[in-house]
Amino acid sequence: MEIECPNCKQKAPDTATACPSCGTAFATPPDPGAPYYRPPQAGSSGAPADRKDKTVAGILGILLGGLGIHAFYIGNTKMGIILLLTGLIVGIVTCGIGFGIPGTIGIIQGILYLVASEQDFHDKYVVRQQWF
């Protein structure tokens, strides 16, 4: 059985830990038979580079949600641009009143980030980039 390198799309044996063509390291999934999987914590060895702190994202959502800063922080650029442009355009047209729409969305998202578990936050909002 073979696996495909996510970087160069070359085939490699499923026992390989890195791509023989480009050297990209393959991620190893957690043991499905394990009773509980705890993701690596930020700052510990082996922590993924894309791991974002849910507390930081939640506070950014609550305080600066109308500008989409929390979305940019977690890597969801599309959502960040939509919130930023909506806030600016609707805010200008309504003399600032419409800025509350993306601000309210940011507050709701910030609260959802804070109450989610680390794994749920990472899976739903960082990897799958869900809004709610």
Image: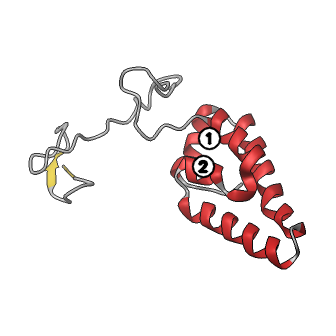
Q: Residue at x 53, y 38 (%)?
A: 52
Q: Which mark is residue 125?
A: 2
Instruction: Find residue 70 and report its horizontal and vertical position in percent.
Output: 64, 49
Give the answer, above or below, for where 96 lies relative to 108: below
Q: Residue at x 86, y 61 (%)?
A: 100
Q: Nearest the camera: 7 or 99?
A: 99
Q: Residue at x 72, y 36 (%)?
A: 114
Instruction: Find residue 3 and report its horizontal and vertical position in percent.
Output: 22, 51
Are there few (<14), some (14-19), or many (20+) residues within 10 Å of tag 2? Answer: many
Work out which residue is located at the far bottom of the displayed protein and give it. 93
Instruction: Find residue 21 and report its horizontal and vertical position in percent.
Output: 9, 51
Give the answer, above or below, for where 99 lies relative to 23: below
Q: Secondary structure at mark 2?
A: helix
**Taking 61 as reference, is 16 left or right?**
left
- Give how far apart the Cα atoms at labels 1 and 2 are: 6 Å
Q: Find out whether the residues at labels 1 and 2 contact each other: C-beta distance under 8 Å.
A: yes
Quarter of the picture holding the C terminus: bottom right
Q: Residue at x 14, y 44 (%)?
A: 23
Q: Secondary structure at mark 1?
A: helix
